[in-house]
Amino acid sequence: MNLNQVTISSTNVAKATEFYTTLGLRLIVDALPRYVRFECPDGEATFSIHHVEKMSDSHNVTLYFEDDNLDSTVKELQTKGIIFTSVPEDKSWKWREAHLNDLDGNKLILFKAGENRKNPPWRVES
């Protein structure tokens, strides 16, 4: 089994499309105003957004996008008007992370984990 895509909701898919395009995702399906789908610039994962009239009261989704050049990517995105709730910092779980929200309040984490992404020192051996 392999993860195909993650889909989030948005009240304004067109504006959300601009936001995620600015982050560097490539638009591959355009069914505005109800649905769009992106490819990540690295790897095989895809990401989609579908239209809802009202966002749910519970924001339980956090999207993680890995970037080997995290610090420079964050600086570049800031020059494009992207606002971060926290700039890159090293975490105790050996990842470097920067946090932000999209226009609908979905939480995003841009991170660099390298080998620790799937193989941290405390990994459970099978």
Image: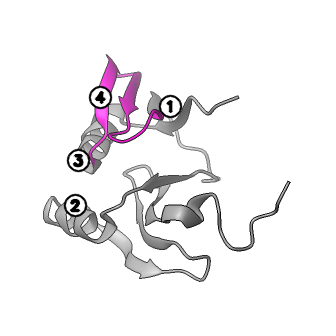
Q: Quadrant of residue 10?
A: top left
Q: CA distance from mark 3 to mark 4?
A: 11 Å
Q: Position of residue 126 (x, y in %)?
A: 86, 53
The magenta stretch is 24-46
The first of marks 3 and 1 along the sequence is 3
Evaluate if marks 3 and 2 touch, with contact meaning CB atoms under 8 Å apart.
Answer: yes
The first of marks 3 and 4 along the sequence is 3
Q: Label 4 amino acid?
A: Leu
Residue at 21% over, 69% down: 75
Q: Secondary structure at mark 3?
A: helix
Q: CA distance from mark 4 to mark 1?
A: 20 Å
Q: Label 3 amino acid?
A: Thr
Please give the residue where the numbered disc 1 appears in the rendered image: 52
Please give the residue where the numbered disc 2 appears in the rendered image: 77
The first of marks 1 and 2 along the sequence is 1
Please give the residue where the numbered disc 4 appears in the rendered image: 27
Q: Position of residue 62 (x, y in %)?
A: 56, 54
Residue at 45% over, 31% down: 48
The first of marks 4 and 2 along the sequence is 4
Q: CA distance from mark 3 to mark 2?
A: 7 Å
Judge by depth and name the residue closer to the eye, 47 or 111.
111
Mark 2 surroundings: few (<14), some (14-19) or many (≥20) residues within 10 A: some
Q: Secondary structure at mark 4?
A: strand
Mark 4 surroundings: few (<14), some (14-19) or many (≥20) residues within 10 A: some
Evaluate if marks 3 and 1 touch, with contact meaning CB atoms under 8 Å apart.
Answer: no
Q: CA distance from mark 1 to mark 2?
A: 27 Å
Please give the residue where the numbered disc 3 appears in the rendered image: 22
